Amino acid sequence: MDPQPHPHRVVVLALTGLLPFELGIPHRIFGRANDQAGRPLYEVLTCGLAPGPVRTEADFAVQVEHGPELLATADTVVVPASWELGPVYESGTLTDELAAALAHIRPGTRLVSICTGGYVLAAAGYLDGRPATTHWASAEHFQRLFPAVRVDAGVLYTDDGDVLTSAGVASGVDLCLHIVRRDHGAAVANEVARRTVVPPHRDGGQAQFIERPVPEPQLATTAAARAWVLDRLHEPLRLTDLARQEAMSVRTFTRRFREESGTSPGQWILGQRVERARRLLEQTELSMEQVARESGFGTAQSLRKHVQAVLGVSPTAYRRTFRAASSVGTLPSPDGPSVDAGSVH
């Protein structure tokens, strides 16, 4: 029998004034990730600047059992949002107590922030010269306070290898799912998302602010077209075909789609095709040509180009890392004129 692997330890730093929702995200996402034998892939623990109660921005406190020494044992440190960061927010400087706590973090530890938790990483110098994001309402102030940081106010999260940041609130879920996907593949991340009842993947480059997140009831939406596309990702897709599903002109459909999803139809389709390619690479023995056809990229060359651009590794390297045994179902055959997903606007 294989020995029990040591789970990757995630330590969440709880600071005064923390937002309970953001505090719970790492526990919910990482805590639900299991291997094929049902064993936990992560161990999630919480620490404060001292053991004891930590006041939240709600009408209750949380009892934290561990002090900052726990940070020295972390493989990943997560700093959730707080609305009482004091000099960190006001002048971009750490308090002595917070600086002493962060000094426990070992070199090479992965660092993650959720929402305004990015202020802590920036004040400690971890974000200098790196891309980062935070809640859109704080982004301008964040950039003024930390000019050495390459702030992108328009994305859900950033991934710079060992340092990752997310925008506000629910984007912390997206970032933690992205980390699970990066660590253990799409199949594990999708199962966590399914159990958490959230979408399995929103690309980090998607806009933070969507003009009409919940469409007004009297307005036509593009949901039917998106469902239609998901059944036909392997087929060549035309923007006119998508617009026809909603009985809209191409211009109206494109505008409505961007308002509702925060991205263009072409970029959304590209993301969905990469996700399908991920699953096929992980779960099947299909050749690269077959994966390319079934995911809608057409050729192995196109598959390599898009997977490398999105995932940062080749399809072969991705498969080697995240191989999982399962069979592929029968998919419909291609039909109709071709349009490259990334070129639909």
Image (cartoon, grey):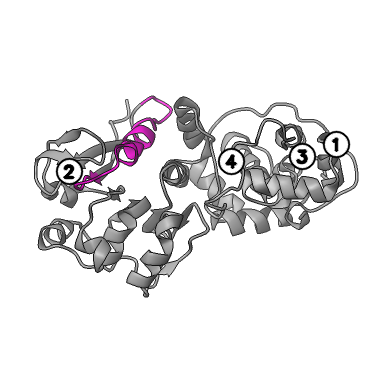
In this rendering, is residue 229 above or below 289?
above
Q: Are marks 4 and 2 in contact (CB under 8 Å)?
A: no
Q: Badge 1 is on which residue?
A: 247
x then y, percent, for residue 18: 25, 44
Residue 5: image quadrant is top left
Q: CA distance from mark 1 to mark 3?
A: 23 Å
Q: Which mark is residue 213?
A: 4
**Magenta span has 71?**
no
* Magenta segment boundaries in residue numbering: 12-38
Q: Residue at x 48, y 32 (%)?
A: 193
Q: Are marks 1 and 3 in contact (CB under 8 Å)?
A: no
Q: Residues within 10 Å of mark 3 (few under 14, many from 20)?
A: many
Residue 39: image quadrant is top left
Q: Quadrant of the N terminus?
A: top left
Q: Residues within 10 Å of mark 4 (few under 14, many from 20)?
A: few
Q: Amino acid at mark 4?
A: Pro
Ranked by sequence position, the earlier of labels 2 and 3 is: 2
Q: Badge 2 is on which residue?
A: 47
Dot in front, 3 or 4: 4
Front residue of 285/128: it is: 128
Answer left or right for 203 relative to 287: left
- Badge 1 marks a residue whose secondary structure is loop
- Badge 2 marks a residue whose secondary structure is strand
x then y, percent, for residue 138: 39, 59
Q: Which mark is residue 234?
A: 3
- Badge 4 marks a residue whose secondary structure is loop
Q: Residue at x 80, y 31 (%)?
A: 332
Front residue of 191/175: it is: 175
Q: Is residue 258 visible?
A: yes
Residue 42: image quadrant is top left
